[in-house]
Image (cartoon, grey):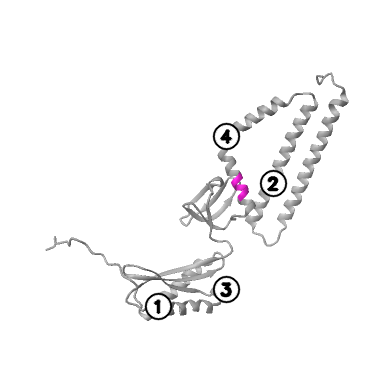
Amino acid sequence: MPWNEAPFAALWVPAVTSAVLAALGIIVVQFLGFRALRFVRNLPNILKARRQQFVTFIQVLQWGLSLGIGVVFVLILLSALGLDITPLIASAGVAGLAVSMAAQGLLRDLIGGMLILIENQYVVGDVIKVGDVSGTVERITLRATYIRDLNGSLHLIPNGEVRVVSNMTRDWARAIVDLRVAYEENIDQVLDLLRDVSATLMEDAELASHILEDPQVTGPLKLEENAFTVRVAVKTKVGKQLTIAHALQKRIHAAFRRERIALPHLYLDVWPPDNTSR
C-alpha cells in the first residue's frame, strides 16, 4: 500500500518510535562521552599530551556512534513511510565502495592513528625512529605524526606508513660509549681504568639519580686494523642517556690523558709519492 493510503498509525507509530530510540541512543552516547571526557581530564599523573590523545579518541568515537545512529534512524524512517530502501542501500554501498577506494590511503592513516592511540605506541615528547626519520614527537593526530629531528626539520609521517617504529624513550634507556684503544696499551689496564671512571658516576649525587644499574664495562668487542674496541654501558632513566654519556666521555678523556693511554691515530699513505717538488 502506498504511504499516502496507509493508516496513520501504521505509518507514524514506527517512525515516532524509531525517532525516540534514536534520540535516546544519541543522548546515551553523548552522556557516556561526557563522563569519559571528564574522567580522562581529571586523571592524575598523566602526561598532558597523552590526556589530549584520549580526549581526541573519545570525541571521534562519540561522533562516529552518533552519526551511525542518525543514519540508521533515517533508513528506518524511510522504510516506515513505505519507501523501498533497498536501492538506496545498494547505491550507498556502491558510493561507499567508490569513496573508500578513492580515500583508501586516508582510511589507512585514520586506522593507523586509532591503533597508535589505543596501543599507546608512543606519545608527544617521545624520541622515536620511523624508517629513516628520527626525532622528538611534537604532535599526533588521527592522520599523521609530526616528528622534529635534531636539525630542526619537522617531518610529517602519515600514520598508515608507520610500519616499524623504535621508541627510544620508553621505560628506560642506555648510554653507550665505545672507545677505540691502540694495541700498544694493556687491555686489562684499560678495562680496570674504565671501571674506576664509571664508578665515579655513582659518587655524583645528581648523575647517580639518573642511573638505574651499575655501569657495565666489556671488551674487547672487536679487533680492527690499528685498535681494539671496548664499551661502557649505563642503564639510565628515560631521556637521560645523553647526559650520562657526555659526563662519562669527559671523565674518560681526562683519565686517559692522566694515565697517558694512547688512542689510535689515523695514518694516510699517498701512493705513488708526490715527486713534483723535487
* Range drawn in magenta: 111-115
- In whole angstroms, how far apart are the C-alphas of marks 3 and 1? 27 Å
Which of marks 2 and 3 precedes in the sequence?
Answer: 2
Residue 133: x and y in percent read 48, 52
Q: Amino acid at mark 3?
A: Ser
Q: Nearer the viewer, mark 4 or mark 3?
A: 4
Task: Assign a secondary structure to mark 3.
Answer: loop
Which of marks 4 and 2 precedes in the sequence?
Answer: 2
Marks 3 and 2: CB-CB under 8 Å?
no
Q: Read off the residue under disc 4.
A: 101
Q: Main secondary structure of the magenta part?
A: helix
- In whole angstroms, how far apart are the C-alphas of marks 3 and 2? 40 Å
Q: Amino acid at mark 4?
A: Met
Marks 2 and 4: CB-CB under 8 Å?
no
Dot 3: within a 10 Å radius of its alpha carbon, few (fewer than 14), some, or many (20 or more) residues? few
Q: Classify residue 61 by image quadrant.
A: top right
Residue 223: x and y in percent read 36, 69
Residue drawn at 67 percent across, 45 percent down = 60
Q: Name the one closer to the observer, 98 or 218.
A: 218
Which of marks 1 and 2 precedes in the sequence?
Answer: 2
Q: What label sits on residue 118 in the rendered view?
A: none
Residue drawn at 36 percent across, 77 percent down = 261
Q: Classify residue 188 by image quadrant.
A: bottom left
Q: Read off the residue under disc 2.
A: 59
Q: Read off the residue under disc 3.
A: 209
- In whole angstroms, how far apart are the C-alphas of marks 2 and 1? 59 Å
Q: Nearer the viewer, mark 3 or mark 1?
A: 1
Residue 18: x and y in percent read 81, 34
- In whole angstroms, how far apart are the C-alphas of marks 4 and 1? 63 Å
Q: Classify residue 231 by image quadrant.
A: bottom left
